[in-house]
Amino acid sequence: MSEIDLTPLKPAIESYIPLGRSGLLPALHAAQKIYGWLPQEVASEVAKSLRIPLAEVHGVIEFYSLFYNEQVGKKFIRVCTDPACALKGADRLLNDLCKHYDVEPGQTTGDLSLTIEQSPCLGLCELAPAVWTMDNGQSTIGDGTKEEYHPSSMVYGQIRELTSNCGEGTTTLAKYGEYSAYKKALKKNTEDVIAEIKASGLVGRGGAAFPTGVKWEGAAKADGSQKYVICNADESEPGTFKDRILLLDDPHLTIEGMCICAYAIGASKGYIYIRGEYPYIVPVLENALGEARTAGYLGEHFDIEIRVGAGAYICGEETALFESIEGKRGFPRVKPPFPTTNGLFDKPTVINNVETLCNVPLIISKGSAEYRKMGTEKSSGPKLFCVSGDVVKPGLYEIPFGVTLRDLLKMAGDIAGKKPLKAVLFGGAAGAFATTAHLDLKLTFEDLRVAGLPLGSGVVMVFDETRDIRNVLKRLGKFFAHESCGKCYPCQMGTQRQMEILNRVAKGDVLPDDFVRLEDVGWTMTDASLCGLGQTAASAVLSAMKLWPELFVEGQRLKVEDQKVSKVSKVSKTKPKTVKKVTKATATKSKKTTTKKK
Amino acid sequence: MTITLTIDGQEVIADQDKTLLEVAREIGKDIPTICYHEATTANALCRICVVEVEGQRVLQPACIVKVAAGMKVQTRSEKVIRSRKTILEMLDSTMDLSETPEIQNMMKDYNADPNRFPDAERRESDVKDDNPMYVRDYSKCLLCWRCVQVCAEDAQYTFAINFDGRGFETQIGTFFDKSIPETSCVLCGQCVAVCPTGALKPKREFLLEQGMSPQEISVLNTGRKQKSKVKDQRS
C-alpha cells in the first residue's frame, strides 16, 4: 500500500476546525470522501486538527457503520435485506451479485475494486428490493436492474396536503412560492403561534406522538439566549420512507416549518440531521437552503446547517442525535433533563420529525380550526403512511386520520396476486403485527392504542398468506442487534440473545423453554432499557408471540419441512450458510475484524 | 427540603436532592448496583438498580432518579425481579464472572440460572499484557464504563481508552488498537482501581496468580529476556 498523502486532507477539513468536537462527523465524512476509508494517519490528522483525543476519534469511527477503518472497495454495493426488501427477493439479489463479482457478502474483492454488504433498511421500501451503490463518491440507487441518482416518489392517497408538491421531482422555491405561512406567523406574537400549534392537536410524527405545541412551549419558556431547532431526518425505521420523499420533493415545506418554529421559540440556529443513507438528498437541501437565504428567509435571524449521519439507527433517538451533532458516539442520554431545557449543547432545543415540521406551515396557513377538520377529534390532520410489501401499489399514502386499514389497503390495490392477507406490520421494526381481525380498525392514535398497535412512523408493511412470519422476525432480530448502541445492558445483550433465539425459531429448531426465554428477554428490554430503541426492540416479537404462539415452541422443525409454502423461507433455506455468515459479518462489521484481530 | 414518599409501602421522609438509591439504602433496602460508583458520573446503564415507580411507563434506575413528593416506589416487584434476573442471566452468558463474587451473590439472590442461555455467543478477548503496570482481560469486562470515565473527564483527562464497536460487540479499546505504551496513558492506575470485575488487574497481582514468586517478579522487572520466559510459563 502506498504512503498516505495528507495534503488534500487539510483544505477539506479546514472549515470544520472552528467547530471543534462538533466538526468531527463532517470532517470524517470529508476525509473518507478523499481516501475511500479512514486510515490511521488520516484519523490522527483529523484528531489533531480538531483537537480531539485520538481514542475518542477512534470510538466515533467504530460506532458508525458507514465509517471504515480498513480499506474497502472503490465501489460499494449495499443490498437491503430487511423485511420489505426480503419479500421482493433481496436475498437472491444479494447472492446473485456476490456470485457475479465472486465475493462474499461483507467482503471486499482482492483488487479493492468492490465491496458488497448487506444493509439495514435503506428507506426505499416501496422500490424493493433496494440497492444503494457508491462508486467513487457517486451515489446511485436501484433494484438490481436499473440505477438512478434519485429514487422516484410514488405518492397516492385521498388528500394532498403534506404531499401537494410531491411526486414530480424537487419543488424549487419559484414553484413553492413565498413562505406565506412564515410571513403570517411573523405578524403574530410568538405565544399566539405556539397557541395555534397547540390548538391544532398536532403530535409528533416520528413515532413518539408527543404534542408538538407543548414541546415548543417548553423550549420557548426555558431560560437561555441560545436555543436550537432540529429537524430529525434520520429516518431509519425499517419500512419508513416518508421523510425521504418530503425532503427530496418539497424541501421548502420542512424549511418553512423550521423557520416558524425558530421564531416561536426564539432559536437562531437550526440543524437538519439527515441519515447517511440519503446522500442524494443533501445537495437538494443545500440548494433549497441557498434559495431560502437569497429570498431572505434564512440568514440574519435564523440559519440552518445540514448534518449527515453515518449509519446508526439509534441517532434517530433525539438525545443520541444531539450527541452525534456534538461529534460523539450516538449514545442516548438519560432523561430527564429533557431536550426542551437541556438539548443540543445542553441548550433548550426543539427537535421535530420532518413530517411534523411539514404540518406546521399548513396549520398556520389554514388556522388550527380549519386544520382540525381533517382527521378525528383526538387525531387531527393528515397522516402519511408508508405502504410496502405484498400490495399492488406500494408507496406513500396521504390520508386524513380515521380511514380504515381495509380502505388504505384497497387504495394500494389490495394484496398482490389476490392472495389472502396474513399480517400487517404496523409502525416498523419497533411496531406490532395486525391481522385480518384488524381490517376495520380506524387508523387513528386512539383506535390503534385500544388495539394495542403503535402508529409509530406510519409503517404499513403487508404480508400475504404465503409468507413465513418467522423469517420476518429473524430479520427484525438482526436489525436490532446490529443497531443497539451497546450502552444499557438490557438492550446491548438482549438484542443479541433475541436475535439468537429468533434464528432458532426461523429454522424451526426451537430449544425447550425458548418461548419463556424470548419473553423474558423481550420484557426485560421493554421494561428496563434506557431509551426507546431497547424499549421497543421486542415489540413486534412479543406481538407475534401472542398471535402465533405455536411458532415459538418445540416441534416446529417438522412444520417447516411439511409446509414448504413460503417462497421467502425457501430462498433462505437454500443458502443457510451464506445467510448466517452475512448476519455475523454485518453484526460484527468488517472493520472490527481488523481492529480486533489481535 | 424534605419530602415524603413511599418505598415498598413504607412512608419515608427524605431530602429531595437525594436519589432513590441513596434513600432506599438509608432505610436498609437492598437495591443491587453494578455500574454505579460513587466516584464516577452515574450513567444508569447496567439497569440492575431499576425499581417500579407508580405512574411511570418503564422501570426507573434508582441510581439517578431523584426522590419526589408522593412517589410510590416498589423495589422488588415482579417486573423488577424479572428484569434483574434476566440481566444477570444475560451477563453470565456473555462474560467471565469468575472474579465478581458480588454478581455471583446477586445471581443467587435472584435465583438466576447461569445456564439460562444455551448456545449464546460470548464476548471473548485475549489477555492484553502490553505494559508494566496492568493487564487487560476484556473477557471479564462488563462494560460499566468506569475505566473510560476516569481516564477522561471523571478524573485523569488522559483519554487513552474509548470504545471499539457498538451493541453486543462493544469493547474497551485504544486508538486503532495501539498498545498502552503507545497511547496517552500515564499509568495512573485509576482505571484498575475502579474496575469491578478483574478485567483490569495490576500486573504484579496477575503474575502472582500465574504462579510466579515475588522474587521472580522483581527479576522480571529488570530485563527483557525474562519477559518472554513469563509468557512461556503462562502458556
Image (spheres, coloured by chain):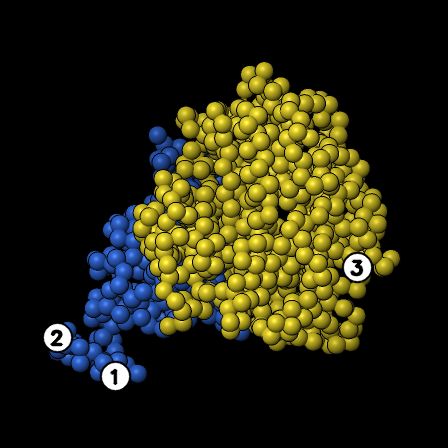
Chain colours: A yellow, B blue
Whole-number angstrom distance, CA of label 3 to CA of label 2: 73 Å
Query: Which amino acid does the dot numbered 3 rest on?
Result: Asp
**Residue A537 visible in the displayed image:** no
Label 1 or label 2, whichever comes before in sequence order: 2
Whole-number angstrom distance, CA of label 1 to CA of label 3: 63 Å
Subunit bearing disc 1: B
- The residue shown at (60%, 44%) is A281
- The residue shown at (49%, 49%) is A530
- The residue shown at (78%, 49%) is A438
Residue pointed to by mark 2: B222
**Label 1 close to label 2 by CB (< 8 Å):** no
In the drawing, does residue B208 fall left or right of residue B51? Answer: left
Subunit bearing disc 2: B
What label sits on residue B233 in the rendered view? Answer: 1
Query: Which amino acid does the dot numbered 1 rest on?
Result: Gln
Residue pointed to by mark 3: A464
Q: Few, some or many C-alpha atoms within 10 Å of disc 1 (few <14, some 14-19, many ≥20)?
A: few
Quadrant of the rendered image containing residue A553 = bottom right
- The residue shown at (83%, 57%) is A416
Q: Few, some or many C-alpha atoms within 10 Å of disc 2 (few <14, some 14-19, many ≥20)?
A: few
Q: Nearer the viewer, mark 3 or mark 2?
A: 2
Q: Are marks 3 and 2 on the same chain?
A: no
Q: Are marks 1 and 3 on the same chain?
A: no
**Residue A170 visible in the displayed image:** yes
- The residue sitting at the right extreme is A418
Query: Which amino acid does the dot numbered 2 rest on?
Result: Thr
